[in-house]
Image (cartoon, helix red, strand yellow):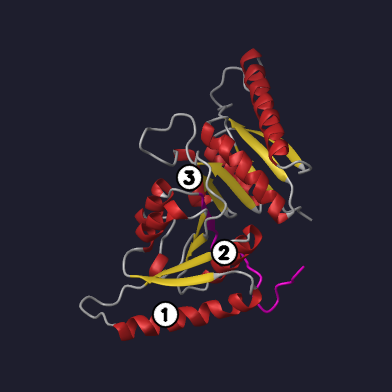
Amino acid sequence: MRTPTVVVAADGTDASRSAITWAAEEAHRRGQPLRVTTVMDWDWSTARHGYAGELFETERQHADGLVNTLARRAREAVPGLEVETDVLIGNPAAQLIIDSENADLMVLGSRGHGGFAGLRVGSVSQRVATHAHCPVAVIRETAVSGDRPVVAGVDDSPAAEGVLETAFTAAHQRDTGLVLIRSFLPPPGVRSPELDAEEHARFTEQVAPWRAKFPDVRVETLLAHDGVAGVLVGVSHSAQLVIVGSRGHGVIAGTLLGSAGLQLLHHAECPVLIVRSGHQPLQPETRKTE
């Protein structure tokens, strides 16, 4: 049986070093081991000597040294944490997407080597965040205060249960408040306090089972009349974590695959956690308490 594991992909940049610390703390909160992974960008099909030769060995030694150094950083951040290392070989995005099949969470730095100024998410992180098989967290270079709330965008799709479970669990583990935001866009020209009240009542009903299961979490539910990605980007400067679903319908349709999702990944001021649509959450009535 597969051991639940947090995987952090790192390349030695400032963003990946921040991701190491964040991933170590998250693995500790979850009670799971951490695997520190890097990818040698090596195309064996065109390399003159394949996996042999001095150049390959030099690159491999560098990769081994990098993951060992970063593993020490993780152990220093969380003493006693179980930390493994791994070096993958091949196209970085493709290898990490494959590796995500064996992870409960994959953590990425927001920008790696070769990133362009002004782009907050590198091409590898963007591809992995879009196509990974497990939830993905994208971490900024700068630290975020732990007294800030967790924020989540919640739609009315079945996939929203996974977002709610993740959001309540994250707030509970961090002993902080939770802000749930729904973007409500009534038909053009049809906007009234009554419609807002009806939608807010539906939202409150949807959240109620999770409030009952996590009575210690301080929850605020908000309706917004703008696109959800822009709203979440706006509140990210005062949040410690923003959580969204990878797909849905209605208010966050195409969150990850469309321009709205890319806007959030590129412009959020705090870590972004993307819950996969295939993630099977524990339902409120069956979730075990410790």
Q: Amino acid at mark 2?
A: Ala
Residue 63, position in %: x, y? 64, 26
Residue 71, position in %: x, y? 70, 34
Residue 263, position in %: x, y? 37, 51
Does residue 119 lie above or below 246 as drawn? Answer: above
Of pointers 2 and 1, the one earlier in the residue sequence: 2
Spatial separation of the CA atoms under disc 1 and disc 3? 35 Å
Mark 2, other Cα within 10 Å: few <14 / some 14–19 / many ≥20: many
| Magenta residue span | 271-290
Q: Amino acid at mark 3?
A: Arg
Mark 1, other Cα within 10 Å: few <14 / some 14–19 / many ≥20: some
Does residue 88 lie above or below 220 as drawn? Answer: above
Total labels drawn:
3
Of pointers 3 and 2, the one earlier in the residue sequence: 3
Q: Residue at x 63, y 74 (%)?
A: 215
Name the side, left or right, on which 45 lies relative to 264: right
Which quadrant holds the C terminus? Answer: bottom right
Task: Looking at the picture, tell me which residue is in the foreground, 161 or 201.
Answer: 201
Name the side, left or right, on which 22 lies relative to 83: left
Q: Amino acid at mark 1?
A: His
Badge 3 is on which residue? 127
Badge 1 is on which residue? 200
Task: Looking at the picture, tell me which residue is in the foreground, 189 or 85.
Answer: 189
Of pointers 1 and 3, the one earlier in the residue sequence: 3
